[in-house]
Image (tube, rainbow, N blue to C red):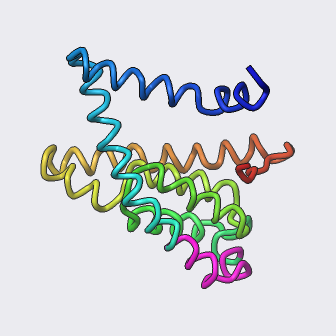
Amino acid sequence: MNSRAIGFLKKFGFFLLFAVFIAVSHIGSFAAGKEIGKNFRVFFLEMILILPLMFILIGLFDVWVPRERLMRHLGPGSGAWGILWVVLLAMLQAGPLYGAFPVAALLWRKGCSVRNVFIYLGAFTTIKIPMLAFEVGFLGWKFSLLRGLFSFPVFIAIGFLLAFYLKNRQFEVREPG
């Protein structure tokens, strides 16, 4: 094999193997493989439909919100108000978890403190308003209130601990590619 073909297989070999597995599963009526293919198709369509819109909104946020304003409200000296702002941003945002990471990267690039980036990610995973509505409907308001009261201090503490841990290290968010 030439080096180009080897490079292609290194880059896309797993995906080719996955496609072959799904195709063989459908031909051979392998139920687990069919279910895996169905789930992949559903999640892939969800990503294709949601991610472009999210990237457009992130791009608009990047252009419309000046770095200085974001640093003033969410930067290292923002204190409790910065925490409140990132929690509010996370609560109001909808969508799957993979949609939070581009926003977190943008916040970091614009000067948000490490603490507030991690608090944003914690708040996004636990107290989004759309998720809370479902939770209250299925598990009740007492459960949601207790879970919120326990998880809120935890992700804030994690944000402070990670900021302390990363303080004197060369922490950076690398651009893909």
Picture coordinates of residue 5, whole percent (x, y) = 70, 28
Observer-nearest of 142 and 68: 68
Q: Main secondary structure of the magenta part?
A: helix
| Residue 27 position (above or below residue 170) | above
Tell me the residue at 73%/49% (across/down): 177
| Residue 76 position (above or below residue 155) | below
Tell me the residue at 35%/36% (across/down): 40
Picture coordinates of residue 84, whole percent (x, y) = 51, 67
In the image: residue 20, left or right of residue 61: left
Q: Is residue 69 magenta?
A: yes
Q: Is residue 150 magenta?
A: no
The quadrant of the picture occupied by the N terminus is top right
Magenta-tinted stretch: 57-71
| Residue 38 position (above or below residue 177) | above
Residue 37: image quadrant is top left
Residue 164: image quadrant is top right
Q: Name the residue furthest front.
A: 1
Observer-nearest of 5 and 163: 5
Picture coordinates of residue 67, whole percent (x, y) = 72, 78
